[in-house]
């Protein structure tokens, strides 16, 4: 702070020394007008910067503002306080914790000089003259903890000469020129002179010379060793500053070694019967989320806190860890489920709790963020269940950090842009449109960057708005959208059946330009799919630009880039692209990020969350992610779409099976949500289980088709019998599973998934020869046929006329080489939800094909897909309420 000549001299010496030994050093200069707040802000920034291993505040502070020096030195983080001046470091030194603190550089240098003499300090009588916080007091402590008998003298010491005469080791830091006389010194003593003083000297050009606190000429005759001034303690002080900085960097690297976690797990208190999910969640005291971040090796500047229990993680961590090897990649999927679900989320959480809290492996869960539609509808939340949950479950199931709201805003901006553009093109001439699209601002007309891209797409290589011909102006301003081809709908994160078909534009201000449209639920938006597949901000922005929202009347695709909205979408989504950090009940880390539909989209959490987690866990750790619906849908898309774009290769498939689902596939009565299970599901029936294992066998084959080992997790319910569970395990192993185990994690937490965790560990060591099912260069129809025949068991496919037209259109538009994302029922391997087990010989009807070009796939529609759920007669919201006293949420499940 300021511009003192002596301070600048000292700083330059330190910068020069750092440069000589390869330390990157910078001098941050604050003006003498800097306030205390300015200095503290600068220190806080350096404290938080992981690239800075140590820094010093040069004293004295040259300022015309009142500044508390003690407050400034104590603001420096102890682990970066290489000057050793903070109260914490001073306190540790005074207690003798020499290995856990930084020692002030001058005393540290003095001690090194004493060691260099070869004289043993232990048992010697030492005298320190001076008691400053920088030299005298820490020198006393340092000598004391090196087992010397130490006396500290100061300005009030009346018998100074007598005390000096007793010293085997004398350290002087009084700041008074030649105050210690040579004749005071004990013969053979070691003398360390820390003083720097100026005395008059007419023989010098400056009229003065530098001397120490000891009369050197006479003292050197009696001392065995003595430091000169200048050139003695000064250079050692600088050297010790360099040494402390290196030590700080070494400590930092040891502490933040990638993959080296020191994590505190939460102990579960299990109760029987198992309480409700929200009771269990609210009985748990989650760790502060910044603690979780620190435990897994994230730096403070890589974490954005959203309260105490959730945080966003900066994408910059990927660049920091780019040279680190990835951990083991595990995907959790399931057999074809009942409408109740078979516990994939619960199994995912149970597995990571077992691997982490019980087997002490580095492990991350990566899961989808749920829509609020089902939370308030009939299904409830998606945080897992029982003693295997992401917590707090109310935060997880409700707004989280606002990602879905950001998607809603971005999606609806595109929808508004489409209809506004159609309206303006219908009501204005080419020139009027052009004047408004490229307005004159202060007499200057200029294309925006996104408009330049549109010109280039049209083959118009001009940048001067005045240079376009009338034909070029017409091409530029006319998107000429065919309303009948609009595929982009407005969205809302609420189940609302009355928005499935609406009429828009009925206000008189829209001049009669109405059209039929609809609302979808937010998680079905292509923007959600883009978020899940993007590998960074730039990739996300490019994908947004490629999103096709309609076709022109000439059959050309109209994109978000053509609408001019791409940059705005990226701005709305700039925070949503960062994964959300949470934790499980047992304290293992979780990334919650993205939640695309598993039918019209690929049904998997984000690529970015997986990539960051794989780097953080290290090469021996595990990342467990979940694929939506059964293996024929979510797992197939995980492999053929997500892994294709991410470049990641899975090591293990965990296939979740239940007794009740297999009984259903074996011919059991219909299972209906909200209706009690028939007795066939609550009483032992080995025949139904055995017959239903045809579905289990087929899904094991589906996973093995991709060359990845399969571990079957038999998720046990309280009504299941030992014989039924054992039968499933036997069938799974006979069908080619690497292993199959019973799991009781819902009731026991990670402990109940220990057998599964160990099986996954073993399977991860087995050969994994991952391969895709198809080459994207194949014709669209061939790719669909391969999925239908190889994964579903169909004899063939049948494209209805609308689907045939779309194949021709998308191939013509250049989208024929995109992966395929089949949109079919999750309740059967076939297109008919009533066909259970493993049906064969059927013909799969393809009703239509649509394109999510930005996300990067075509999605054939097998039957009718609802993209806006409705509310049942008695929705979940009847039971949800807020406690006005505690502020707690009640009734979620």
Image: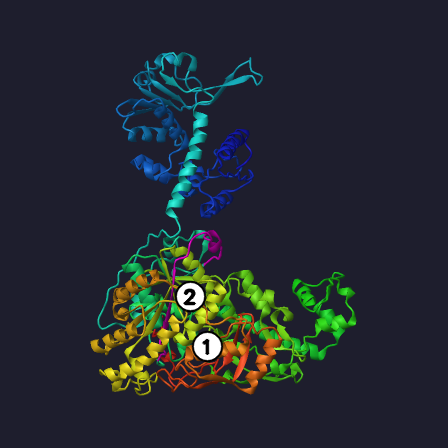
Can residue 63 be seen in the rendering of this structure?
A: yes
Report how many numbered discs are placed on residues in the image: 2
Q: Which residues are magenta?
A: 313-337
Asked whether the residues under the numbered discs 2 and 1 touch, taking CB atoms below 8 Å apart as contact, a structural biologist would say no
Left or right? Give the position of 157 relative to 609: left
Q: Earlier in the sequence, mark 2 or mark 1?
A: 2
Q: Compare residues 879 and 870 and report the one nearer the observer.
A: 870
Q: Compare residues 537 and 69 and report the one nearer the observer.
A: 537
Left or right? Give the position of 19 relative to 741: right
Considering the image in quadrants, where does the C terminus appear? Answer: bottom left
Secondary structure beneath dot 1 equals: helix
Q: Is residue 69 above or below residue 517?
A: above
**Residue 750 position in % (x across, y down):** 28, 64
**Residue 713 position in % (x across, y down):** 30, 71
Secondary structure beneath dot 2 equals: loop
* Quarter location, residue 464: bottom right
**What's the CA distance linking mark 2 and mark 1?**
17 Å
Tell me the crowding category of disc 1: few under 14, some 14 to 19, or many 20 or more residues within 10 angstroms, Cα based.
Answer: many
Q: Compare residues 708 and 577 and report the one nearer the observer.
A: 708
Q: Compare residues 105 and 763 and report the one nearer the observer.
A: 763
* Quarter location, residue 387: bottom left
Tell me the crowding category of disc 2: few under 14, some 14 to 19, or many 20 or more residues within 10 angstroms, Cα based.
Answer: some
Residue at 41% x, 18% y is: 214
Q: Which mark is residue 889?
A: none
Q: Is residue 554 above or below residue 114?
A: below
**Residue 736 position in % (x across, y down):** 32, 72
Asked whether 317 falls inside the magenta stretch, the response is yes
**Residue 146 position in % (x across, y down):** 29, 29
Q: Which mark is residue 770?
A: 2
Can residue 716 be seen in the rendering of this structure?
A: no
Q: Give the residue number, with chain letter if any, for mark 1.
A: 787
Asked whether 661 falls inside the magenta stretch, the response is no
């Amino acid at each position: 702070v300021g511009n003192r000549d002596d301070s600048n001299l000292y700083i330059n010496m330190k910068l020069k020394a750092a440069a000589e030994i390869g330390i990157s050093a910078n001098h941050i200069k604050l003006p003498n007008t800097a306030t205390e707040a300015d200095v503290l802000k600068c220190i806080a920034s350096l404290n938080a910067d992981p690239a800075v291993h140590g820094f010093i505040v040069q004293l004295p502070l040259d300022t015309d503002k009142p500044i508390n020096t003690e407050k400034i030195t104590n603001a420096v983080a102890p682990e970066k306080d290489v000057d050793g001046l903070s109260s914490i470091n001073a306190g540790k030194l005074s207690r003798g914790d020499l290995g856990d603190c930084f020692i002030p550089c001058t005393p540290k240098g003095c001690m090194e000089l004493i060691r260099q003499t070869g004289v043993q300090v232990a048992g010697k009588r030492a005298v320190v003259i001076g008691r400053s916080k920088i030299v005298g007091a820490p020198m006393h402590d340092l000598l004391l903890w090196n087992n010397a008998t130490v006396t500290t003298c100061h300005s009030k010491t009346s018998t100074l000469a007598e005390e000096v005469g007793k010293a085997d080791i004398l350290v002087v830091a009084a700041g008074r020129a030649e105050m210690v006389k040579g004749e005071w010194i004990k013969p053979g003593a070691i003398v360390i002179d820390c003083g720097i003083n100026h005395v008059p000297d007419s023989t010098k050009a400056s009229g003065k010379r530098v001397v120490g606190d000891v009369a050197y000429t006479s003292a050197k005759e009696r001392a065995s060793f003595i430091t000169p001034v200048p050139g003695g303690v000064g250079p050692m002080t600088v050297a010790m500053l360099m040494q402390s900085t290196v030590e700080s960097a070494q400590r930092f690297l040891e502490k933040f070694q990638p993959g080296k976690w020191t994590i505190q797990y939460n102990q579960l208190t299990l109760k029987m019967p198992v309480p409700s999910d929200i009771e269990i969640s609210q009985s748990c005291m989650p760790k502060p989320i910044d603690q979780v971040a620190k435990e897994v090796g994230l730096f403070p500047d890589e974490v954005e806190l959203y309260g105490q229990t959730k945080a966003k993680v900066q994408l910059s961590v990927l660049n920091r860890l780019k040279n680190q090897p990835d951990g083991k990649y595990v995907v959790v999927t399931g057999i074809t489920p009942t409408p109740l679900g078979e516990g994939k989320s619960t199994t995912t959480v149970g597995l990571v709790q077992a691997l982490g809290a019980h087997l002490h492996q580095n492990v991350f869960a990566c899961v989808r963020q749920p829509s609020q539609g089902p939370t308030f509808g009939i299904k409830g939340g998606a945080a897992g269940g029982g003693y295997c949950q992401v917590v707090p479950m109310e935060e997880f199931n409700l707004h989280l950090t606002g990602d879905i709201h950001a998607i809603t805003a971005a999606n609806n901006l595109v929808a508004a842009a489409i209809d506004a553009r159609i309206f303006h093109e219908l009501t204005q001439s080419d020139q009027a449109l052009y004047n408004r699209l490229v307005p004159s601002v202060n007499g200057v007309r200029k294309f925006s960057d996104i408009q330049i891209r549109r010109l280039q797409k049209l083959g118009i290589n001009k940048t001067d708005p005045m240079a376009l011909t009338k034909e070029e102006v017409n091409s530029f301003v006319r998107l000429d959208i065919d309303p009948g081809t609009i595929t982009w709908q407005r969205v809302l994160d609420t189940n609302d059946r009355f928005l499935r078909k609406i009429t828009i534009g009925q206000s008189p201000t829209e001049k009669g330009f109405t059209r039929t449209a609809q609302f979808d639920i937010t998680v079905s938006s292509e923007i959600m799919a883009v978020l899940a597949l993007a590998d960074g901000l730039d990739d996300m922005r490019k994908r947004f630009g490629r999103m096709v929202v309609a076709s022109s009347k000439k059959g050309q695709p109209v994109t978000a880039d053509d609408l001019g909205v791409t940059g705005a979408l990226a701005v709305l989504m700039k925070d949503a692209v960062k994964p959300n950090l949470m934790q499980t009940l047992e304290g293992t880390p979780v990334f919650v990020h993205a939640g695309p539909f598993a039918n019209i989209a690929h049904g998997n959490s984000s690529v970015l969350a997986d990539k960051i987690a794989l780097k953080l866990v290290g090469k021996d750790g595990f990342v467990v992610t979940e694929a939506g619906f059964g293996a024929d849908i979510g797992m197939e898309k995980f492999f053929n779409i997500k892994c294709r774009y991410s470049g990641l290769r899975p090591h293990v498939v965990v296939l979740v099976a239940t007794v009740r689902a297999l009984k259903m596939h074996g011919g059991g009565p219909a299972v209906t949500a909200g209706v009690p299970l028939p007795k066939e599901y609550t009483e032992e029936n080995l025949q139904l289980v055995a017959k239903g294992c045809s579905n289990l066998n087929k899904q094991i084959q589906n996973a093995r088709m991709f060359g990845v080992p399969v571990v079957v997790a038999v998720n046990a319910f309280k009504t299941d019998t030992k014989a039924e569970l054992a039968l499933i395990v036997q069938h799974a192993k006979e069908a080619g599973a690497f292993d199959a185990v019973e799991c009781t994690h819902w009731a026991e937490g990670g402990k109940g998934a220990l057998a599964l965790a160990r099986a996954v560990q073993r399977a991860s060591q087995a050969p994994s020869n991952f391969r895709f099912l198809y080459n994207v260069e194949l014709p669209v129809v061939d790719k669909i046929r391969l999925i239908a025949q190889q994964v579903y068991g169909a004899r063939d496919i049948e494209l209805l006329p609308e689907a045939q037209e779309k194949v021709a259109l998308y191939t013509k538009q250049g989208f024929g080489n995109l992966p395929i994302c089949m949109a079919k029922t999750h309740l059967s391997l076939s297109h008919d939800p009533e066909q259970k087990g493993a049906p064969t010989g059927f013909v799969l009807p393809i009703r239509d094909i649509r394109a999510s070009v930005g996300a990067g796939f075509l999605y054939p529609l097998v039957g009718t897909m609802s993209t806006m759920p409705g509310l049942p007669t008695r929705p979940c919201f009847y039971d949800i309420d807020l406690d006005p006293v505690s502020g707690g949420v009640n009734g979620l499940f």
